[in-house]
Amino acid sequence: MTTTTAETVSRRLRFRRRVRDLKAGLRGVLAPLSVGWGDTKRSFADGGDRLRAGLRDWPPEVRLLLLAIPLVVLLALPVLPFVSPFYKTVLIDRVAFYVLLALGLNVVVGFAGLLDLGYVAFYAIGAYVAAYFTGSMPVAPPFVLDPFLTFPFAILITMLFGVLLGLPTLRLRGDYLAIVTLGFHEIVRITLLNVEGITNGARGVNAIPQFELPFADPAVVNYVVALAAVGVLLAGIGAYQLYRGRRDGGRSRGAGLLLVVGGVALTGASPALGLPFANLAERFVDFGLDPVPYYYLSIAICALMVFIVRRLSDSRVGRAWVAIREDEIAAEAMGIPTLKMKVWAFAIGASTAGFAGVMLAVKTSFISPQNFVLLQSIIVLAMVVFGGMGSIVGAIVGATAIGFTTEALRDFDAVPFLEVFIALGVVVAVYGLLVASRVVSNRAGPVYGWWLVAIGVLLAALSPVLRLPFRAIAQNPDPWRLFLLGLILVVVMIARPEGLIPSRRRAAELHGETTAAEAKLTDAGEQPTTDEAPLAGGAQ
Amino acid sequence: MLPLCRSGRGRYGARRTREPRVGRTDSALPGCLGDETGLVQSLVLGLQSGALYAVIAIGYTLVYGVLGLLNFAHSEIFMTGAFTATFVGAAFLADGGPQTGGALAVSLIAMLIPAMLLAGLMAVLMERVAYRPLRVHGAPRLAALITAIGVSLLISNAALVRYGAEQIQFPNVMSTQTVFSISGVVITNKQILTLVTAFALLALLDVFVSRTRIGKGIRAVAQDAETAGLMGVNIDRTVAITFLIGGLLGGAAGMLQGLVFNTIRFNMGFIPGLKAFTAAVLGGIGNIRGAMLGGILLGLFENFGALCVPDGARWRDVLAFGVLIAVLMTRPTGILGAKTAERA
C-alpha cells in the first residue's frame, strides 16, 4: 500500500461529491416537473445551474458520456420499436404495461409504505371494465363505448374498488395488510373465473375492439361525449383551482376561472363541435393490431403518470405518505389524517392499474383470469423493490430490467450469448482497471480492481464455454425463465438491498451511519448543498 | 399459553369461546343443516386439511416471530419434503405395492425422516445463503420479502427444470382403506394417519418451544432479538434452528400431502403454502398456537363452506379469504395475535 489512509479517504470523498453533484444536476433538470406550473422558467434555469455544478468536477470525457447517455436514451425511445420485431412486442406487452403498473404500485408501496400483494387485482378489474363497456362480455353494458372512452370508467371503477378495499382494511398494519390484499386478489380472480355467465370464466373474453382514431363507432355521439367529458374534467380542475385560490392568496384563481369557463363552454358546445371533430378525426390513425401506436400511447401515459406521481410526491399528500411510511403513530400525532391518506394512496395506485388494464385488454384483445395470477402481482412488486422503493426512476428501471429479462429469457435463441459474455468481461475488466488505477474509488481498494480485471478477462476468454449451458437452456427455455428470474432477484437483493436506484431518503435510511459520518467530514471542507436536506418526498 | 410473540397467558379464555362460535355460524347456514352425514364428513375432511395447514403454518409463524419475515419460500420447503419422500419411496420401497402392518410403519418412517431432514436442511440453507446476508446488512424488510419470493421462484422452478411439469406418482406404499364407516361418514386410514401425525408433531413442537432451553431462546429472540443477544442467546444459531424446525414440519406436511393425494408436482407447494400463510395470519402471525388454531379453523371452514354454500367447492378459496378479511376486521392482529404488534 503506497497511499495513506487519509489520501484514500479524501479520494473517496471527492468521488462521492462528484456523484452527488451530478445527481443534484439531473434532479435540477427534472425540477420543472416538480415545481409549480408558474415557476417553470425559473426552475429550468435553476436546473441548468445545478446541472452545470454537477458536471463541473468531472474529466471532459466522462462529462461527455454523462451527457450522452440520457440523450441517447431519449432519442432511442421513439425508434426502438423499429429495431426488431422482438423489441416491438416486448416493449409493449412486457415493458410498457409493467412500467405503468410499477409506477402505480410504487405509490402504494414505495411512497406510502403499504405492502400490497394483490395489486394485479386492480389491473384485472380495469381490463374487465374495458371489456364490459366495449360490449365484449356475455352481458351487454347499458351503453357500448369506444375503447378510448372506457379509460375514465376503468379509472373510476378501479379507484372505487381501491377505496372499497382500503377503507376497511387500511387499519391493519404491515403484513396483515399484505395478506388481506393477497386475499382480495384471489377473491377477484376466482370470482372472475367462476361467474361464467358474466365473464366467460376460464375461457376468457375475446374480440375486445382495438383503439381506433377515429372511434371504432364513427357515430358523432362518441365525439360529443368525449368532448363533454374533457370539458367537465377541465371545469373540475378549474373549480379546484378556484377553491385552492382562496387559500393561496388568489394565485391560482385566474387560471382556475379560465379553466372553469373553458370547460363549461366546451361541455355546452360539445353537441355542436361533435360533427366537425368527427370529420377532423377521420384523418387520424387506426391502431389495429400494430403494436407501434400502443407503444407511443404507453409512453404518453407513462409520461403523464410520471408527471402526476412526481407532482404528488412533493405535494402535501406525498409528504403525508412519507410521514406515514416512516412512522404512522408520529404522523397521526402530527395531525395527518392517516387513514384518508392511505386510502388515497390505494386509490391512486389502483387507478393506475386500471389504466394499464384497459391498455392490456385493448392491445391483446383477449383477457382471461389467467392473465392476472398472483405471480403477476409478485413480479410487479419485485420490480418496484428491485428498482428502488419510493423512486420513480427506480420503478421504471426495475420494470424495464425485469420485463426485458423475463422476455429475453423467453426467446433464448435471440440472445447472443457469446457477445454478451465478451461485453460483460470487457465491462468488468475496464471497471477493474479504473478501480486499480484509482480513477474510481472502491471500498475494497485497488487490489480488488486487479481481481476484477482478471475476472473480466477470464469471462471474455471463456465466453465460448460459458455460453454452452445457455445454449442448452435455449433448447427448452420456458422452465428456466422464472428460475433465472428468482436467481436474479436473490442476487440483486443481497448485493443491493435498497434496489438499483433507491430514493435518496431510502438510501439514507439504509446507510444512515455512513452518510452521517460523511456529512461531518465534508461539511468541514465545503459549503453544505441545499438539496441534501430531505425536503422532497422521496422521489428520484 | 405460549407467548412466542408478545402474547400473555390469559388468552386461553379467548380461544375457548371462539372455537364453538365459528362452529355455530357454519351450521346456521341454510341448506346443509339436514345433511348430518355431510356435516360430519366435512368435519373429518376439515380437520384433516386443517391439521396439514397448521403444520405448514408453524413454519411461517416461527420465522415471522423471530425475523419478522414472511418466508414465501416455505411452500417450496413443503414441496421438497414431498419430493424427497417420493424419491426415497420409489428407490427403496414401493416396488412391492401397498404394504400393511409393521412393514408399512417402517416404510412410512423411512420416507418421513429423510423428507423432514432434507426439508429442514433446505430451510437452513435458505436462511444461510439468502436471508442471513440481508439480516447482517440490516436490509429493509421488503428486500427480504423479495428475496424470499426469489428463493421460492428459484426452488420451484429448479424442480420444474429437473422433474418437468407433469404430476409424479407418489409411491403406492399405503392403499386407502375405510376404517370407520358410521352412517355414511367415511374415515380412511390415511385420514387417521394424517391427523395423528400432524397432532403429534404439533404437540411435540409445543412442548419443545415452551419447555426446552432452545425453545426459550427462540421465544426470547422473537420477543426482542437485541436483548436476547445481550442475555447470551446466540441469535444466528437460534434463527437457524427456527428455520430447521419450520423445515422439519414443512417436510413432514409435504410427505403427508403426497400420501393423501397420491401425486406430487413442482408447484404443489403454492396453494397449501398460501393457505397456511393465511392460517398463520388468521391465528395471529408470530403466535404458534395461533397458527395451529388458524390452520384448523381454516380447514374446517373451507370444508363446511364447500358443503353449505351452493356450488361451494368452486368458491372455497373465496370463502377462506373472505373469512380471513372478516376476522381481521374485528381483530386486526388475528385471533390470538398480540394487540400491540407494531411493525410497519
Image: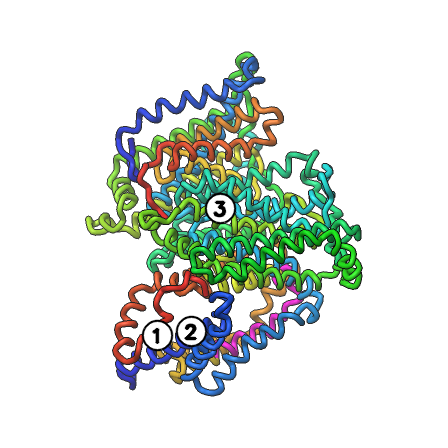
Residue A508, position as x, y percentages in the image: 35, 64
Query: Which one is nearer the viewer's eye here, A511 or B185?
Result: A511
Residue A381, position as x, y percentages in the image: 50, 53
Residue A529's label in the rendered image is 1
From the image, tell me which residue sits under label 3. Answer: B76
The kind of residue tagged 2 is: Ala
Query: Which one is nearer the viewer's eye here, B37 or A62?
Result: A62
Report how far apart the C-alphas of labels 1 and 2 lie in the structure.
9 Å
The kind of residue tagged 3 is: Glu
What span is in magenta?
Answer: A408-429
Q: Are marks 1 and 2 in contact (CB under 8 Å)?
A: yes
Q: For mark 2, name the chain.
A: A
Relative horizontal placement of residue B22, taking residue A396 as reference (left or right): left
The kind of residue tagged 1 is: Thr
From the image, tell me which residue sits under label 2. Answer: A24
**Residue B241 seen anywhere in this rendered image of the structure:** no
Classify the position of the N terminus of chain B by image quarter.
top left
Q: Is residue A428 magenta?
A: yes
| Picture quadrant of residue A256 | bottom right
Number of the front mark, 3 or 1: 1
Which secondary structure dominates the residues rendered in magenta?
Answer: helix
Residue A48's label in the rendered image is none
Relative horizontal placement of residue A358, taking residue A163 as reference (left or right): right
